[in-house]
Image (cartoon, grey):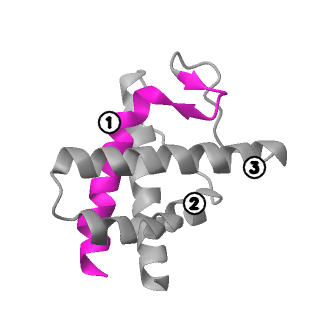
Amino acid sequence: MIRGFFLCGIIGWIMEIVWTGVWSLINGDFKMVSTTSIIMFPIYGMAILLKPLYDVMFDLPIYMRGGIYAFFIFAAEYFFGLILTKIGVCPWNYSDARFNINGLIRLDYAPAWFAAGLIFEGLVFART
């Protein structure tokens, strides 16, 4: 479980660095500057808590597994965002995004969270 926590934390950081760098490029920054926060490491690390879901649903079709992962990642993002916002340290704020919910989650990120769940599944859950 500890190994999985660290793997998910590192993989999450890497995904966030790539994601924000690509968005920088799309927005015209050819340096592809990326951002993340140390706070995100334990949040991504907690993705290991999705492993029991993988153990139960590994034979479901990929679209169902990805959708279930996305749902739980959204729930965690909302929950942690709410707590971190209340104490004034939330590293994200989606208030200006079109499909945001309370500035804490963006529904248009569903495909990204779908993919992230499957990445965690392939790189961590299937190996721990």
- What stretch of residues is rendered in magenta? 100-128
Question: Would residue 45 be found to the left or right of residue 22 on screen?
Answer: right
Q: Amino acid at mark 3?
A: Ile
Q: Reading the chain from its start, which is encountered first: label 1 or label 2?
A: 2
Give the residue at x 29% y 68%.
56
Residue with the mark numbered 3: 83
Q: CA distance from mark 1 to mark 2?
A: 19 Å
Marks 3 and 1 close (CB-CB < 8 Å): no
Give the residue at x 38% y 71%.
52
Q: Reading the chain from its start, which is encountered first: label 3 or label 2?
A: 2
- Relative to 3, say whether 125 is above or below: above
Residue with the mark numbered 1: 111
Q: CA distance from mark 3 to mark 1?
A: 24 Å
Secondary structure at numbered mark 1: helix
Question: Would residue 29 be found to the left or right of residue 75 on screen?
Answer: left
Q: Is residue 101 magenta?
A: yes
- Relative to 122, say whether 22 is above or below: above
Inspect this view and state whether residue 30 appears: no
Q: Give the number of the disc on residue 43.
A: 2
Inspect this view and state whether residue 123 appears: yes
Q: Is residue 32 magenta?
A: no
